[in-house]
Amino acid sequence: MDKSGADPLFSIITVSYNAKESIEDTINSIVNQTYKNLEIILIDDCSNDGTYQKIIKWADKDSRIVYRQLEKNSGAAVSRNVAIGLSNGRFLAFCDSDDLWQPDKIEKQISFM
């Protein structure tokens, strides 16, 4: 908890490029965390396989999701830096677009910090 007694905001950054087959499972594992004070930043690096459309569908369902598509393919480092610039959380975590998290990952991480 922060000084106000509230759980601190935790920003989760996921960048994607042509991750249509895995992105929904990844997002699902993030939105279903037991720790709820999350900001989920999804950056698409100009996918051409429908990844961005899947991201938009999730963003329409969950107000914690912030999403952007880069104007040109720029690579993972640029995508992550864009996401960091959009983040507001006290803490950051990176989740690759083909990773799956256990439901209590952030809760355990934040209790350690």
Image (tube, rainbow, N blue to C red):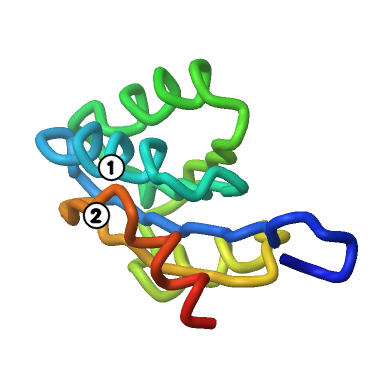
Q: Quickly name the residue at label 1.
A: 29
Image coordinates of residue 104 in percent, x first then y, are 33, 54
The amino acid marked with disc number 2 is: Trp
Query: In this view of the protein, which residue sits in the foreground, 65 or 85?
Result: 65
Which of the image's four quarters has the C terminus? bottom right
> Which of the 4 image quarters holds residue 79?
bottom left
For residue 101, which numbered disc appears in the image?
A: 2
- For the residue labelled by badge 1, is the local secondary structure a helix, a strand or a loop? helix
Say how many tags the image has: 2
Image coordinates of residue 50 in percent, x first then y, are 24, 26
- For the residue labelled by badge 2, is the local secondary structure a helix, a strand or a loop? loop
Q: State how far apart marks 1 and 2 are (Cα).
A: 5 Å
- Asked if the residue at tag 2 contacts the one at tag 1, i.e. Cβ–Cβ closer than 8 Å, the answer is yes
Q: What residue is rendered at 42% in x and 72% in y?
A: 109
Q: Residue furthest right?
A: 4
Which of the image's four quarters has the N terminus? bottom right
Question: Is 64 above or below relative to 74?
Answer: above
Image coordinates of residue 29 in percent, x first then y, are 28, 42
Q: What residue is rendered at 54% in x and 43% in y?
A: 36
Query: In this view of the protein, which residue sits in the foreground, 84 or 89?
Result: 89
Question: Is 96 above or below relative to 48?
Answer: below
> Which of the 4 image quarters holds residue 63?
top right
> Which of the 4 image quarters holds residue 105?
bottom left
Left or right relative to 81: residue 100: left
The amino acid marked with disc number 1 is: Ser
Q: What residue is rendered at 72% in x and 60% in y?
A: 88
Q: What residue is rendered at 34% in x and 67% in y?
A: 75
Left or right relative to 1: residue 99: left
